[in-house]
Image (cartoon, grey):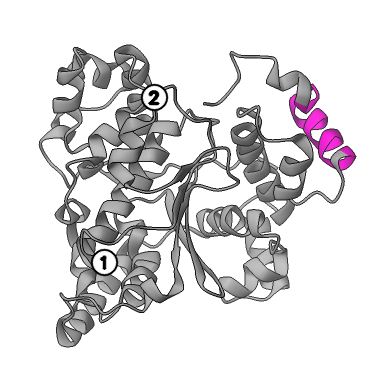
Amino acid sequence: MGKFSMKGLVRSASLTNYAEIARSLNIDPMQQLRLVGLDPRCLLQPDLKISIEAVARLLDSSARAAGAEDFGLRMAESRKVSNLGPLALLWREPTLRAALKALQEFLYLHNQGLVLDIEENGDVAVLRLELVTVSHLFVRQSVELAVAVTHRMLKALLGNHWHPSVVCFRHCDLRDGSRHQRVFGTAVQFNCLMDGIVCRTSDLDRALPSADPEMARYVHQYLKSIHEDSRTALLEQVHQMIWMLLPTGRCSVEQVAAHLGRDRRTLHRQLTREGETFSSLLDQVRRELATRYLANPHHPLSEIAGVLGFSELSAFSRWFSRLFDCSPSSWRTMPTLAIK
């Protein structure tokens, strides 16, 4: 099977404040843009569609050039809900739960590679964000930017007095975590098994002061019309669904097919026509997630094996060695391959 290649795009509004932050840290934003092949016009026109991978490389290279591990957070600090473009209209929903459900459905219009999962367990709600990639990118800055922007959005909706229970990141902590404390105003945990925000289930049922039911219905119709015109291809839908379900332990071809409104046989037939199988796409997602988790030495190999859906560490090691020509522990000793 050929390797699936996803050309994910994001609105150039994702780079709002990039140039100002770069200059404040004494690096040339135009030079950084050239290094990753981005047109400088993307800093002036918020609705251009630009490469997610190029943005991830831009933020990583800028953070390294500036010696600023918190580059993504710096960009998030002055973001406004309006930076989400048409999605900002979703705050007309009656409750936070309804707004987040709508955001799940339409987030693709803003960022084709960012997926939101909402999990509830008793009094705890987990908002998990996944930045779906296929190229083993350095994504720390992009992930921190996405989580921080989501946090700012929630505070804009619920009021500045609101705070989540905890903010989680897969990657290691920083030498100086003062900006994380200032941005999130609550406990920040690193070395976690997910990137996202944990809050109270009751927060999801909070009424939004900006609620307008009639406007909400109109917004849904408007966004659905845009969504139909830019629907993701089947391979991308399956890829994103695997990415979301794998860490939950609920990833199977039956589950993915059901989420996409198909049965297993129909999905298999459609994937075969595209030159892929469910197993080949599953392997590609596992490759991406494996490199992200292995980059953080605080994640035990047995823990990584479980998150990737392997019942035994030995099975994970055999799979990894087949794909990467080395063991997971050996891969960790290769700094040039590590994903931050």
Hey, which quadrant is residue 76 in on the image? top left
As helix, strand or loop, the secondary structure at mark 1 comes to: helix
Image position of 283 (left or right of 87): right
Asked whether, in this view, residue 192 is left or right of residue 334, the answer is left
Q: Position of residue 287 (x, y in %)?
A: 66, 37
Q: Quadrant of the N terminus?
A: top right
Q: Residue at x 70, y 64 (%)?
A: 268
Question: With 87 as the anchor, is 97 left or right in this view?
Answer: right
Mark 2: amino acid: Asp
In the displayed structure, 85 sits above or below 330; it is: below
Task: Report which residue position mark 1 lands on.
Answer: 226
* Residue plotted at (61% across, 14% down): 335
Image spot of residue 336 (x, y percent): 58, 13
Disc sitting over residue 113 in the figure? none
For disc 2, the marked residue is 176
| Residue 189 x, y percent position in the rendering | 50, 42
What amino acid type is highlighted by mark number 1? Ile
Q: What residue appears at the point 74 percent right and 26 percent down from the top-left corner?
A: 324
Tell me if residue 107 is in the magenta stretch.
no
The residue carrying pointer 1 sits among few (fewer than 14), some (14 to 19) or many (20 or more) residues within 10 Å by Cα, namely some
Measured along the vertical axis of the image, is residue 158 above or below residue 114? below
Task: Name the foreground residue: 35 vs 318.
Answer: 318
Res 198 visible: yes
| Horizontal side, residue 236 vs residue 8: left or right | right
